[in-house]
Amino acid sequence: MSDSGGFPAPVLERAARVVLVSFDVDGVLTDGRIVYSERGDEIKAFHVQDGSAIKMLQAEGVQCAIITGRTSTIVERRAGELGVAHVHQGVEDKASVLEALLARLGIDADRAAHVGDDLPDLPAFAAVGLAIGVPNGHPAALARTHYVTRTAGGQGVAREVCELVLRARGRWSYGP
């Protein structure tokens, strides 16, 4: 494989401009399942490679955000562990929250990416320069993306997005 890592050239062109990536949680950073303990505690599983990837993106100057429809203390905890400063939970209108965040940070929409999997992500996809879906996503959502990851939600999606952005910048130094 070449330095493109198998990513399509038009997607790499869009990814080269990205300075902010927003992630949905359920179905993207997790596999979309919600498990409850006998005590009623919510349990989510996050892939360790996604955590490393988010830190790598931030180290390269790419800001990361979480914009999710549900509210969970687990998400706050994980975001805190990773140093994600922009965490928005319980969001019904992801595009409005994303647009406000971009305005506050002075980032043009074409320099942002959103990674999502379902119908609530559609407006956010339309509000960014790089819309990324996951193979376990809703068909209507996938039809509105620029790229669908090879990796399913909860299995390292952020790692693949990190590789895409770093390859697009010529900063991927980990081989094919």
Image: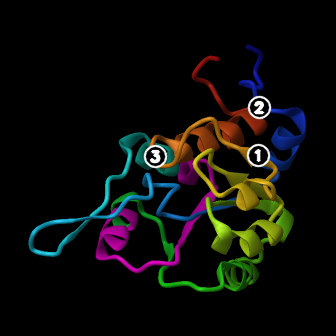
Q: Position of residue 61 (x, y in %)?
A: 63, 54
Q: Where does the C terminus fall, quadrant-wise?
A: top right
Residue 91 lies, with reference to residue 139, above or below; the image says below
Query: Which comes before the other along the chain, label 1 or label 3?
Result: 3
- Is 35 magenta? The answer is no
Report, in whole angstroms, how far the alpha carbon at label 3 lies from the one at label 2.
19 Å
* Callout 1–callout 3 Cβ contact below 8 Å: no
Q: Position of residue 130 (x, y in %)?
A: 79, 56
Label 3: which secondary element: helix
Label 1: which secondary element: strand
Q: Which mark is residue 147?
A: 1
Q: Is residue 78 left or right of residue 20?
A: left
Label 2: which secondary element: loop
Residue 59 lies, with reference to residue 19, above or below; the image says above
Q: Position of residue 75 (x, y in %)?
A: 37, 69
| Amino acid at the residue labelled 3 | Asp
| Amino acid at the residue labelled 2 | Phe
- Is 77 magenta? The answer is yes
Report, in whole angstroms, how far the alpha carbon at label 1 lies from the one at label 3.
18 Å
Q: Write the residue at 63% across / 60% down.
A: 116
Q: Write the residue at 43% across / 43% down.
A: 52
Q: Which stretch appears magenta?
A: 57-79
Front tag of 1 and 3: 1
Q: Which mark is residue 7?
A: 2
From the image, tell me which residue sits under label 3: 50
Q: Is residue 149 left or right of residue 174?
A: right
